[in-house]
Image: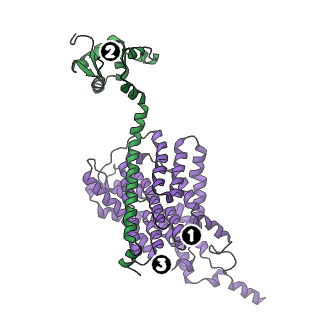
Amino acid sequence: MIGIENITNHNGWAMAAVGATIVFSGLVVLSFVISQIHKLLKLWEDREKLIDRFKKKAPPAVAEKVDAPAYSERHLPSVDELTGAYKPLVDQLEESFKISQLFEIANKNDMPHPHLSIQRLQEADILVAQGDGTFTWNQPKGK
Amino acid sequence: MFDLFFQFLTNTGYYLADYRHYIMIVVGSTFLYLGTAKKYEPLLLVPIGFGILVGNIPFFKGFGIGIYEANSVLHYLYFGVTTGVYPSIVFLGLGAMTDFSSLLAQPKLMLLGAAAQMGIYFTLLGALFFGFAPREAASIAIIGGADGPTSIFLTAKLAPHLIGPIAIAAYSYMALIPVIQPPIMRLLTTRKERLIKMPPARKVSKKELMIFPVAGVLLCCFLAPTALPLLGMLFLGNFLKECGVVNRLANTAQSAIVDTATIFLGFTVGCSTQADVFLTPKSLGIFFLGAVAFSIATASGLIFAKIMNLFLKDKINPLLGAAGVSAVPGSAREVHLMGLKEDPTNFLLMHGMACNSSGVIGSAICAGILWSFFV
C-alpha cells in the first residue's frame, strides 16, 4: 500500500501533528525556563535586600548597622562630602521620596557606590525614614 | 596440489566478488576521499569509509567473519550500535564538549531548533506515502534531524535492518552540508535579510551554565522519557564540564571516551553496508527521502526565522534558521560563512551554535517521541 491511504491507515497524520506539537511546545517551555534562570539567580543573590524590604526595618534597626564592615568606610567619602554631593540630587525630588528614586537618580548621575553612600546617609540620619516607605532629607532644602 | 590451489582461489575475495561489492568499494573510497582530501566531516567519514571497504570484502559465509554472522568479532563490535550504546556514549562526549552559553544568552533562538525538526515529521509522511512501514518511516524521518547518533539510536530500536542505509544517509548529508544548505539559504532569504546583524550575546554566569543541564534533563526527559539514553547522557556530559569539580571526568568524556565510541560507531556502521544487504531499492528510497528530510529541515528553520521577524522588534538573521538542524558544528559554520560572504563584519557563528545545540536537544526529543509512538 502506498500514497495517502498508507499515511491514513497508519495514523501518519496524527503522528506528525502530535509529534511536531510536542517537540515544539517542549522546546518553547525549555527556552522560557532558561530565559528565567538568570532572573531567578539575581533574585536569589539579592535575597537579603528583598527580605529587608519586606520586613520594612524600623530606623533603630537601621541604626544598628552603623557597625558596617571597615572596607566600606575606607573607600567612601565622609558624610559631609556625601551630603554635599547628594543634596543637589535630593533637591530634584519631592519632599518625601523613595530610596529607589534616589538610587535611580544617583545612578543616572554616575555617583560612585550609590548603595553604600545612601546607606551611610541613612546611618548618619541625613536621610530619615518616615515609616511609610519614604524618606526625607533632614536639612531644609536649598540650604 | 592444484585442487588445493583452486580451492584456495575460490575462497578469495577476487573470486567471490560481484559488481555490488565493487560499487560499495567505490562508495567507501569516495567517503575516504571526501573525508581526507576535502575534509568534509573527517571524524565521521574516515572510519565509515574504511568500514565500508572492510565490510565489502567478499568472504565465505558461515566462517563467523561478517558483521551479520553470530559470534564474529565485528558482530560483537556492532552490538554497541544495535543496542544504542555507542550513540549514548557519543552524546556523553558531545555534552562534555558543548558550550550552551550562547543558547542561554539568547533563548529565543531555541525556537529555530524546534522549527527545524519539522523536516522530521514531513519526511515521516513522505516515507509512509512511498509505502514504507510505520517503524521504517519513523527511522527514515529522523534523518531530517541531521544527527547521526540519534538516527542510529532510533533505527536500532525501530528498524534495525535499516541501520546501514540510514546511518550512511544521515552521515553523508551531514558531511554534505556545504553542498546542500547554501542554495536553500540563498533561495529563501533576501540579501537585506542576510545582512542583519545580531546583537552581542550577554555574559552568562557559571551558575546558569550549571543549572541548565539539570533543568534540561528534568524538563526534556519528563516530556519524552524514551529520549533518556540520549539526553540523559548529553546533559550528564555537560554537567561534568560545567560543575568544575570533575574536570578529569569531563576531559576524558570529551576526548578518549567519545573518540573510542566514534571509531567503533563509524567503523561498524561502515561494515554494516555489506553489498547484499545495502544495495537494495529501499536504500535508494532512504537516500532520496533523507535528502528531502534534510532540505525540509533547513527550509523550516529559515522560514520560521522569517515568521519570527514579523513579530520581533530586534530582528534575527534568518540564516540562523538553517543552523537549527543538529549537525554540530557544520551547519553553524555554514551560516557563519554565508553571513561573512555578504558582510565580512557579520559574525554569526556563536548565534548559529545556539541554534545548533537546541537542534541536538530537539532531534533527541523527536527520537524519543517517535519511539514512544511504537512502544
Chain for disc number 2:
A
Chain for disc number 1:
B
Whether residues under marks 2 and 1 lie with C-beta atoms below 8 angstroms apart, the answer is no
The structure residue drawn at horizontal position 44% and vertical position 53%, both measured from the top left corner, is B357
Number of the label disc, if any, that sits on residue B270: 1
Q: Quadrant of residue A132?
A: top left
- Kindly indicate whether the residues beneath marks 3 and 2 are on one polypeptide chain: no
Q: Is residue A54 left or right of residue B152?
A: left
- Up/down of B88 relative to A109, above or below: below
| Amino acid on which disc 3 is placed | Lys
Task: Decide if residue B252 is in sight here.
Answer: yes
Q: Is residue B250 left or right of residue B125?
A: right
Q: Residues within 10 Å of mark 2 (few under 14, many from 20)?
A: some
Residue situated in front as seen by the camera: B271 or A133: A133
Q: Quadrant of residue B262?
A: bottom right
Residue B22 rendering spot, x and y as whole percentages = 56, 79
The structure residue drawn at horizontal position 31% and vertical position 58%, both measured from the top left corner, is B304
Distance in Å between CA atoms under marks 2 and 1: 75 Å
Task: Decide if residue B29 is in sight here.
Answer: no
| Amino acid on which disc 1 is placed | Gly
Q: Is residue B52 left or right of residue B109?
A: right
Residue situated in front as seen by the camera: A53 or B233: A53
Color of chain A here?
Answer: green
Instruction: Say which quadrant the N terminus of chain B sits in.
Output: bottom right
Color of chain B here?
Answer: purple
The residue where tag 3 is placed is B282
